[in-house]
């Protein structure tokens, strides 16, 4: 398999930090708050690889640091330390060494992001079609007819009525807002897609449709994805490999089936007892 992303020793500290931050936090100490300087160690010494067309799950409870990982990789936050390489055919990008213009180029041409909160991923002041058009314009598409047709195609693909493409997202349900977010993220056919708790807070039937859509996209477009979730059912359905995080550290990683069926770490064993939601249990493979 061809590698698309390589992350090594990623750490992110919120606060001034001190020499004891990493030694006095972590799963063994049941805290990610440094007792000396009160900084929050959101992630420490995290390494991962992602391959083209693969879906990697990052699982953990709230505060485990899983969302911090994708926010650093999508340039929403700057890491405290670490290295990350994005491979684009014959080019390599050292993500954490890029300037602002280079980061914008990658976000506009190669990356897609779907947030748990649609307000972070959509412009609620313009129409659903306008959100997609905005993404296409940033990707240097200028022909109005082509933009309009591409927006219509993407909304159809994500099961949003094209009759509503000129309507503001604020008038849509949460599930429809998520589908518009996905359509916007897919507008440029990105090879790399980040999904941060995309089914949280949605009705069970809507969750199932969103998950089905994600699988269809991955299979049809061979898009590499990192899926962040606290839901075991989402991980079971989508991810071939999974990382489990607690207090900013990776405590277990491997094939998803192995982790869910035979968890080695006590924390993962406890997570495995959590009830799997109906739609993901229904479609789990």
Image: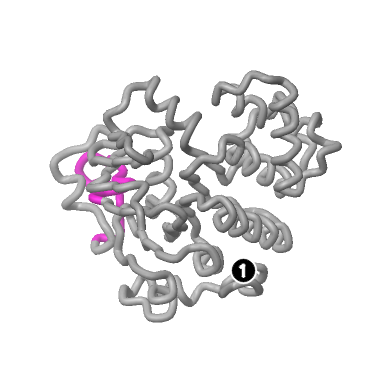
Q: To which residue does mark 1 refer?
A: 280
The residue sitting at the right extreme is: 163
Query: What span is in magenta?
Result: 29-45
**Percent of width and height locating residue 128:** 73, 33
**Percent of width and height locating residue 163:** 86, 37
The residue sitting at the bottom extreme is: 262
Colouring: one colour
Q: Nearer the viewer, residue 171 or 105?
A: 105
> Where is 53 relative to 235, above or below?
above
**Percent of width and height locating residue 123:** 65, 28
Q: Quadrant of residue 260?
A: bottom left
Q: Secondary structure at mark 1?
A: helix
Q: Residue at x 42, y 44 (%)?
A: 70
**Percent of width and height locating residue 191:** 48, 44
Q: Residue at x 83, y 36 (%)?
A: 164
Q: Is residue 237 left or right of residue 207?
A: left
| Neighbourhood count class around disc 1 (C-alpha, 10 Å): few under 14, some 14–19, many 20 upward | many
Is residue 203 part of the magenta span, yes or no? Answer: no
Q: Nearer the viewer, residue 37 or 69?
A: 69
């Amino acid at each position: 398999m061809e590698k698309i992303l390589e992350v090594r020793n990623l750490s992110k500290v919120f606060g001034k930090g001190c020499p004891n931050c990493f030694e006095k936090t972590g799963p063994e100490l049941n805290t990610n708050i440094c007792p000396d300087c009160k900084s929050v160690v959101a992630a420490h010494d995290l390494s991962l690889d992602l391959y083209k067309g693969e879906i990697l799950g990052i699982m953990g409870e709230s505060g485990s640091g899983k969302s911090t990982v994708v926010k650093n990789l999508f340039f929403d936050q700057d890491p405290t330390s670490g290295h990350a390489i994005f491979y684009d055919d014959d080019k390599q990008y050292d993500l954490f060494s890029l300037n602002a213009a280079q980061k914008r180029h990658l976000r506009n041409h190669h990356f897609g992001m779907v947030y748990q909160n649609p307000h972070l991923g959509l412009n609620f002041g313009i129409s659903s079609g306008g959100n997609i058009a905005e993404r296409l314009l940033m990707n240097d598409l200028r022909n109005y007819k082509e933009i309009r047709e591409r927006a219509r195609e993407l909304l159809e693909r994500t099961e949003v009525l094209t009759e509503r493409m000129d309507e503001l997202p604020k008038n849509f349900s949460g599930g429809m807002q998520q589908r518009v977010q996905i359509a916007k993220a897919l507008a440029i056919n990105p090879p790399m897609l980040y999904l941060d708790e995309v089914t949280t807070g949605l009705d069970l039937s809507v969750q199932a449709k969103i998950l089905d859509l994600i699988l269809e996209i991955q299979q049809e477009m061979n898009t590499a994805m990192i899926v962040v979730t606290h839901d075991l059912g989402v991980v079971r359905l989508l991810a071939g490999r999974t990382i489990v995080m607690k207090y900013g550290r990776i405590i277990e990683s491997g094939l998803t089936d192995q982790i869910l069926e035979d968890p080695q770490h006590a924390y993962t064993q406890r997570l495995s007892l959590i009830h799997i939601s109906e739609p993901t249990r229904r479609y789990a493979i």
